[in-house]
Image: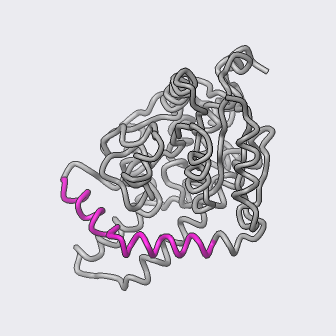
Amino acid sequence: MSAASETSPPFLALAGPTASGKSAAALALARIRPIEIVSVDSALVYRGMDIGTAKPTAAERAQVPHHLIDIRDATQAYSAAEFAADAARCIREIHARGALPVLVGGTMLYFKALLEGLAPMPAADAQVRAEIDAQAAREGWPALHAELARIDPVTAARLAPLDAQRIQRALEVYRLSGRPLSDWHAQADPVSPIRPTQLISLEPHDRAWLHERIATRYTQMLDAGLLDEVRSLRARGDLQPELPAMRCVGYRQAWTWLDAVDAGTPQPLSTLIDTGVAATRQLAKRQLTWLRGLPARHVIACDAPQALEQVLRAAQAIPA
């Protein structure tokens, strides 16, 4: 255990795939003890992206303080290293106010950065990214995924062939440094990580249960105005589909669907639902793969009838 983890204030990490009930569990915990929530979600950092991110409502944010939400414009990037520094600061400040810090979310790279540390690696390079994007336009992302599998099989094994953002970053790091991304991750700073007092992982016994919840939630997002939200973002004029914010699951598929509408070749709404749900299921699959690699997690079956009771019991045992 690192020196940083030995002196870290008590805190709870509540992780899980999308639609596993993390936010509801955290809000239930807020009703029985003083907590503040730190979002571990790479989409919730963006202002103006509310429906497709299932962002906590104004009433929920009034019920319990939330942190690291709405801290970036959609044109801006937000790195895992920035998250780790911001989350560590939030943990200290929340504890000083006499509340329990509860880290809630499903962006596993953020959890990894905080709990295991990240090695410094090459910064983003616009020219290299443009070259990779041009190659992808010619050959397709599956071809670039195959290229990544040759140079960095460890990273390629955890990425889907159409995971453009992460494939691009892995290839970018290799082209800039000559070293695979997995090598950089393996050399994390041993002093920087901090360990949670408890790491609860909400994971379904039955994937079909999670898939049904994902489908229901995506349809509800469309009913709540997701397409209008994406239209508003497109109308700004300063956003492009290649930006990290617009690559978020749900937004990327809606943007592509609206491109077809603008081009005069609209697809039925069922096509958008199918692609949005499929992409979200793939995200959940990747999240579960990451979770299995997190150290000392306490797994609670989110599809079990007593799931919430188990989460609250485990969280109540954490000292103030």
Between 268 and 66, the one lying in front of the other is 66
Q: Is residue 144 above or below residue 14?
A: below
Quadrant into which the C terminus falls: top right
Tell whether 178 sits left or right of 300: left
Q: Is residue 250 above or below residue 310?
A: below
Residue 253's image quarter? bottom left
Tell whether 15 sits left or right of 260: right
Q: Where residue 212 sits in the image (x, y, percent)?
A: 61, 76
Q: Where residue 157 sits in the image (x, y, percent)?
A: 70, 52
> Residue at the location (34% across, 39% down)?
72
Which portion, as a residue range, is magenta? 211-236
Quadrant into which the N terminus falls: top right
> Residue at the location (42% across, 47% down)?
61
Residue 162's image quarter? bottom right
Residue 228 belongs to magenta span: yes
Q: Is residue 307 above or below residue 13?
A: below
The total of numbered circles placed on residues is 0
Q: Where residue 174 sits in the image (x, y, percent)?
A: 57, 35
> Residue at the location (57% across, 38% down)?
110
> Residue at the location (56% across, 70% down)?
214
Residue farthest toward the front in the current orientation of the protein: 32
Residue 11 belongs to magenta span: no
